[in-house]
Image: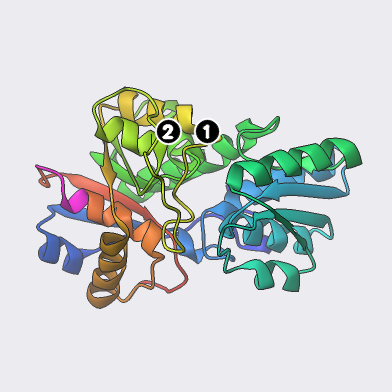
Amino acid sequence: MQMRSLRIGGTSTVRAQKLEKKLGIRRLNLKLEGENPSGTHKDRAALLHALDARAKGFRSLTAASCGNYGAALAYVAEKLNMDCLIYVPSDFAAPRKAEIESRGSKVVLVPGDYEAAVRKSLEDARKNSWYNANPGGANRELGLLSYTYIAKEIAQALGRQPDWVSVPVGNGTVIGGIWHGFRGMGMKPRMLGCSNNNSAVHGIAKGTKGMLDVPDLKVTEINEPLSGNFLTDGEDAIAAMVESNGGAAEVPDEDLVKAATVIKQEEGLDILPASAGAVWGISKLDSKNHVFVAVLTGRAKFG
């Protein structure tokens, strides 16, 4: 998926030879989703939702977000001349609120956590006849579809199926969509879900085949994009890790920061700590003698 006028999709897959040497990995490729305009993979889902909304005659669209998805929707809505309302949990730091508003979208602060923000967004969408762009909502399949293109781009860049694909897990939409994309091509790489304070990753890491609530869940500014016991597409994340015979890695905040620092030092990439955990997860596997891809977000170019 690529819309040239908005510069979304078609991101680079590059080999990280310095990280390979540093971490003892046979072959490590980085899928640089930070090349998307807002700096994350979220632009892909935002684009499909906005185009669907416009095709169905909606003028306004809404979703809950702690920051990245909101920034992506605001970018696309501005380019397509649509109204956008982003519901942000008041409990979260949500550092991209100002950026969202600078693009002409409205930020609505909701008392409570992410689940409360989703509920309020859905309620107001029904009341005001706005398009529901929330993950896990009535239009959830578009979110999953948008991320199938990441799988297709990886396979095309490598000319083969990777052995492992490591993905940061938040709501579960991204890893679920990437897994759908590989399955659609008849490929079955092992999917590694990496997160912190996340019920899907916690469940797999603890040896179950389902979500398992994180006790005493703690949301921080570092793990905000990842954490939650309420996941809109958690079952898709579970399916990706289980059906692929993959795995899960729980990455504490200090290791997320450490991973981002190592990636910056070795490859010159400014990667979000929440996303950098995908590389950390690979480095902790028992066997690293495989072809790996880590899906990363951040703004800096490779090299």
Q: Position of residue 288 (x, y in %)?
A: 12, 47
Q: Please name whichever residue, 66 or 78, is drawn nearer the observer in this view of the structure.
A: 66
Residues at discs 2 and 1 in contact (Cβ within 8 Å): yes
Q: Which residues, given as a range, are shown in magenta?
A: 282-286
Q: Residues within 10 Å of mark 2 (few under 14, many from 20)?
A: many
Q: Position of residue 186 (x, y in %)?
A: 37, 25
Outermost residue toward the front? Answer: 216
| Residue type, label 1 | Asp
Residue found 33% across the figure and 37% down from its top: 202
Q: Which image quarter holds the C terminus?
A: bottom left
178 sits to left or right of 104: left
Q: Please name whichever residue, 82 or 291, is drawn nearer the observer in this view of the structure.
A: 82
Q: Position of residue 145 (x, y in %)?
A: 57, 36
| Above or below 245: residue 67 | below
Was residue 137 drawn as part of the magenta stretch in this picture? no
Q: Please name whichever residue, 237 or 300, is drawn nearer the observer in this view of the structure.
A: 237
142 sits to left or right of 289: right
106 sits to left or right of 89: right
Q: Residues within 10 Å of mark 1 (few under 14, many from 20)?
A: many
Q: Which mark is residue 233?
A: 1
Q: Position of residue 213 (x, y in %)?
A: 40, 33
Residue found 60% across the figure and 39% down from its top: 143
| Above or below 114: residue 269 | below
Q: Please name whichever residue, 238 or 121, is drawn nearer the observer in this view of the structure.
A: 121
| Residue type, label 2 | Ala
Q: Is residue 66 visible?
A: yes
The quadrant where residue 12 appears:
bottom left
Q: Which residue is mark 2?
A: 237
Q: Which secondary structure dominates the residues rendered in magenta? A: loop
Residue found 33% across the figure and 31% down from its top: 203
43 sits to left or right of 289: right
Q: Is residue 189 visible?
A: no
